[in-house]
Amino acid sequence: MIIPRPTELTLHPGRFVIGPDLHLDAGPGTEQAAELLAGYLGRGRARSAAGPRIELSLSPGTTPDHAAGTPTAGTPAAGNQSADNQGYTLRIRPDLVTLASPGVAGLLNGVQTLRQLLPPAALDPANAGPQDWWWPCADVRDRPRLAWRGALLDVARHFLPLEFLYRFVDELALHKLNVFQLHLNDDQGWRIEIDGLPRLTEVGAWRAESALGPGGQMPGNGTPHGGYYTQAELRGLVSYARVRGVSVVPEITMPGHARAVLAAYPELGNHPERTLPVWTNWGISEDILAASDQALDFGRQVLAQTMDVFPSRYVHIGGDECPTVQWQRSPQARERARQLGLGSPAELHGWFLRQLQEFLARGGRRAMAWDEKGYAAEAPLSGMVLSAWRDPAHGALAVARGHQVVMTPHLSTYFDYPQTDDPAEPQGQPGGTVTLADVYAFDPLAGGLPAADPAGDAGPGVLGTQAALWTEYAPTPEHVTYLTYPRLCALAEVAWTDGPRDFAEFRGRLDHHRKRLGALGVAPRRPRPMADRSPALRHPGTMDR
Ligand code: ACM
């Protein structure tokens, strides 16, 4: 009944009963996984050195890391570990549980399997006291198909409370998802405090209202909306996620999607004389950053602080949906393109991103960008990891051009599309429906694409796959949760489980898994359509001003 389905699981007769005491035998380097397990098994339990034993160990010798004598103890920089280091073996007998992996990331995955092998009620925080929970005797050998298994949350279109982000991290970990991409800015809001640029959050984090539907001309709901996270809050989130094996990858999108930046600092745009409000519509804006030294310096200043808050190996710089008409019209941009020897001002798009990529590389980070027409197809951004969000064929093309790619094709992994064509579904992103079956049928390696190993600077291929929760039409945590489930469970299995998949069999496991989610308080409910909600209820739980 485990989701994602393990590579091999054999059940045996008998059980390991977890009594009032917890006999945890944590080998060197396994302390983090032991602490996580102890936390899950209930604070009411005393640690003891008697009784049935749970033994955790880092098993030697199976990975290059170990051969080189540098076990991956300590911080598992998830999304940055080879699939081998994320695998584990688990043996459960009546008097002994052994969990072993070459890497801490693998131990943490094994802990999640142990958690799912408990009765679902054991996941309910209200049942934290020492009850006689048990595990069935079993042997598990497990390893992910893909190293990068992620979900993106757009906190720019709608600000979501910090507590929700913590819960989201917990839910990612439960599903052995190891990357949480946080989309921190967009036309409709800036969400990370930046020292020295106070207007980003004083001005850029707030908008007057939100459009009630797609397109550029929909009426607004009349309700101001906004919010932002302090750097201290985000550091706390990063630590919480790290302990659970989840790497938080920040996204600061540039040079398009810039209306919130330009509302705060019009001088960074192509029309410094114009002060535009933070955008209240959804869609693609022509207002982008200038191709100027000042705008690049802004980008570097923001990215320097972003790197400081987020230790992830990868930093996403967006790059998508960037119309270049303002550059085409701008004498300064045209002159810059000429000086750089570019064929047209449109090519400043790739140039701008490469400047930021180099800056991140000097900080020891790998830049990521959306695979986008305009730069990725014509002029590969060498060394950049691309998020392939259009059709899978674009991802395959990026791999062929030498990129490492995270496959996130919209018609399989964008959970802002309605999940059924039932007319009672709330307003979603127009243009598609992404059903549970669509997600489950998705193969990130379709056509024989190679899986890429994130350890070291290995060659081109598919690092993994990722869900995207864009929030134009999802104003509340409850709405986001509704869009997330059960599609995220399917995506987790797509990312983790190798070999043939059977949708009917998955649905059977999902029925049991819903009990776990219920015990955790994850109760997806279909929201009422936006227009039905009274103004006071439009954004419950968010920080309306
Ligand atoms: C995207 O959906 N524009 C990345």
Image: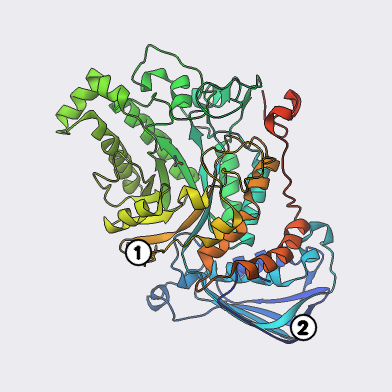
Say whether residue 526 is left or right of residue 400.
Answer: right
Q: Is residue 172 visible?
A: yes
Say whether residue 270 is left or right of residue 342.
Answer: right
* Residue 341 percent location from the top left of the image: 14, 33
Which numbered mark, 1 or 2, is in the foreground of this view? 2
Q: CA distance from mark 1 to mark 2?
A: 41 Å
The total number of labels drawn is 2
Which labelled disc corresponds to residue 456? 1
Instruction: Specify the quadrant that holds the N terminus.
Output: bottom right
Query: In which quarter of the view is residue 241 placed?
Result: bottom right
> Which structural element holds mark 2?
strand
* Residue 120 percent location from the top left of the image: 77, 66
Amino acid of disc 2: Arg
Say whether residue 479 is left or right of residue 44.
Answer: left
Q: Is residue 365 visible?
A: no
Please state the quadrant of the image where ligand 1 appears.
Answer: top left
Category of crowding for the residue at label 2, using alpha-carbon neighbours closer than 10 angstroms: few (below 14), some (14–19), many (at least 20):
some
Residue 93 to residue 132: above or below: below
Residue 221 to residue 487: above or below: above
Instruction: Specify the quadrant that holds the C terminus.
Output: top right
Q: Residue at x 55, y 27 (%)?
A: 205
* Residue 86 percent location from the top left of the image: 51, 69
Q: Which residue is mark 2?
A: 15
Q: Nearer the viewer, residue 431 or 512?
A: 431
Question: Can you tell me whether the CB of the residue at mark 1 lies under 8 Å from the nearest atom of ligand 1?
Answer: no
